[in-house]
Amino acid sequence: MRGRILIWILLMLNVVALHAQRTVRVKTAESLSQVIIDGKKAQKLVNNVWLIHENTNIRCDSAYFYTQDNSAQAFGNVTIVDEVDDLDLKGDYLEYSGNTRIAKFRYNVILKDDSADLYTDFLDFDRNTEIGYYSNGGRLVDSTTVLTSKSGFYNTQTKDAQFTDSVRLKSPDYELNTDTLDYSTLTKLAIARGNTEAYTVEGDTLQTSVGLRYFSNEKYSELYYGTITTPEYAIQADSLFANDSTNYYQGDLNVIMTSFQDSLTIFGNRMQYDRGVGKALVYDKAYLRKLIQNDSLFIKGDTLISVQDTLRDEKYLTAYHGVEMYKSDLQGRADSVSYNMKDSTIYMYQNPMIWNVDSQIEADSINILIANNKIHKMYLTLNSFVIAQDSLLNFNQVKGRNMEIYFQDGFITKTDIHGNGESIYFALDGEESSSMNKVECSNMTIYFKDNAVSELRMYREIDGNFIPPQEIKEPETRLRGFDWKGDTKPQLLDIAIHLKPPDLRETREKNSLPVKKG
């Protein structure tokens, strides 16, 4: 029996101790009186008021203490200091409940802990979760960043915050505006959701309708379904990764990179860009568009490299493996193509072939010179062969070691052949017949008008043969090596994927921010 009584007494003592711990108590006040507030009995405390609840110390100029509700109203220079947690709360007015452990601060509120300071005029702080909520404007300040929004919350235990409605982040290197933002004062990681626009000290702009991640310590950004715009270029992709500390950028899926100065746009599914040396690598369905006057030149290849290095004074584009080119008046194929933007020359290597209007041009290598945004001249080196089809579907042909081909308004006007020159051209005799001229000559020059031969000049070792229409035999109408491939020339939609209907393009569904791996 005595044992049971002892156990009961110990249980009662524990209950009393627990109740005492949960009860708000008055420690000091210079003046105390009994009053009725809204029909409730209260103690009016004035001057140097000190209330205690668990580990919480509440100080203020004056207060109403409701013993029955275990709550208090505090006025003037209100502070809450936790003896265990590194927490300091200040404000002009406080409503505190010992039962719910919720503190409602109003006006000139400051929440401080070891990680950040939160400023607002309306803060509800839940001691159970250690989270403070505000809904009429707030500002969070840590060692590197200032964040403002109309509403949000801050967790003093995890040091995580969430901001909603008119969110703005400002750091020494970055400014950001968004709809919703998650932020860690420990890791300095900011995760923006919804319409987001950010600016860097370098003058870059980041825009997205989905969101981004920004790692302040590393100066590293992850941007989704958005665009990075600098004074020189813009990069768009489903996923963009920008490391401003190393000047390295990466894009994945539906990449579009535009150079404003050069009227140049590069497309692809994978992009790597080193801003320090001005070098971009694009692959996986890669192609580019270069504006040339009122036309566009498209170049497609397995891999595209763009270099714009101002320190080394280099500016060129390179495409390699299965390269195709398209312009309204020019199409081409080669294993690799390089476009030097300094001297406005396109270099084609390994089995290059060009189609120009009704002409087919091939050689071991071809260089195309652009002048005033138009094709001005072509240089053909070794095994040069030019075929031009006239209005009667005859094939005018020129072959030789090296050639120079001159253009005007997209049409061939003159061809210079240097070494081992051979030519077959047809002189039109009315609208339905033509005679054929077959010439062999070391060097020659051929002039064209309306895509037909108008004049032939020959130099050294001339061997010519004139054949009237009725004596022309088919085998004699072809030079050795003749291979007309007009039906294989590249088509616009085979290169420019972005011009295809949307349902035929590769896309990724826009939804929420992807989960970061690793």
Image (tube, helix red, strand yellow):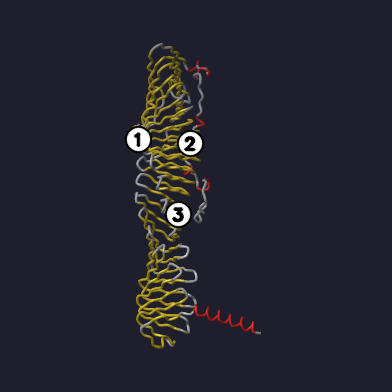
Indicate the position of residue 445 as horizontal and vertical percent values: 38, 19
> Mark number for residue 204?
none
Q: Which residue is mark 3?
A: 213
Q: Position of residue 270 (x, y in %)?
A: 48, 43
Mark toward the start of the polypeptide (1 vs 3): 3
Q: Tell whether label 1 touches label 2 (CB within 8 Å).
A: no
**SS class, disc 3:** strand
Q: Identity of the amino acid at label 1? A: Arg
Q: Looking at the rendered structure, which numbered label has been put on residue 312?
A: 1
Identify the residue shown where x is 47% and y is 49%: 239
Front one among 451 and 445: 445
- Name the residue type under label 3: Arg
147 and 303: which is toward the camera = 147
Tag 1 secondary structure: loop
Q: Earlier in the sequence, mark 2 or mark 1?
A: 2
Measure the alpha-carbon separation of dots 2 and 3: 32 Å
Is residue 396 something one can see in this rendering? Answer: no
Tag 2: amino acid: Gly
Q: Which residue is mark 2?
A: 301
Q: Badge 3: few (under 14), some or many (20 or more) residues near its Cα, within 10 Å?
A: many
Which badge, 2 or 3, is on the more N-terminal residue? 3
Taking the image as drawn, is residue 102 in sight? yes
| Residue 104 in the image, given as x and y percentages of width and height | 42, 74
Residue nearest the observer in this picture, 395 or 263? 263
Residue 86 in the image, given as x and y percentages of width and height: 43, 67
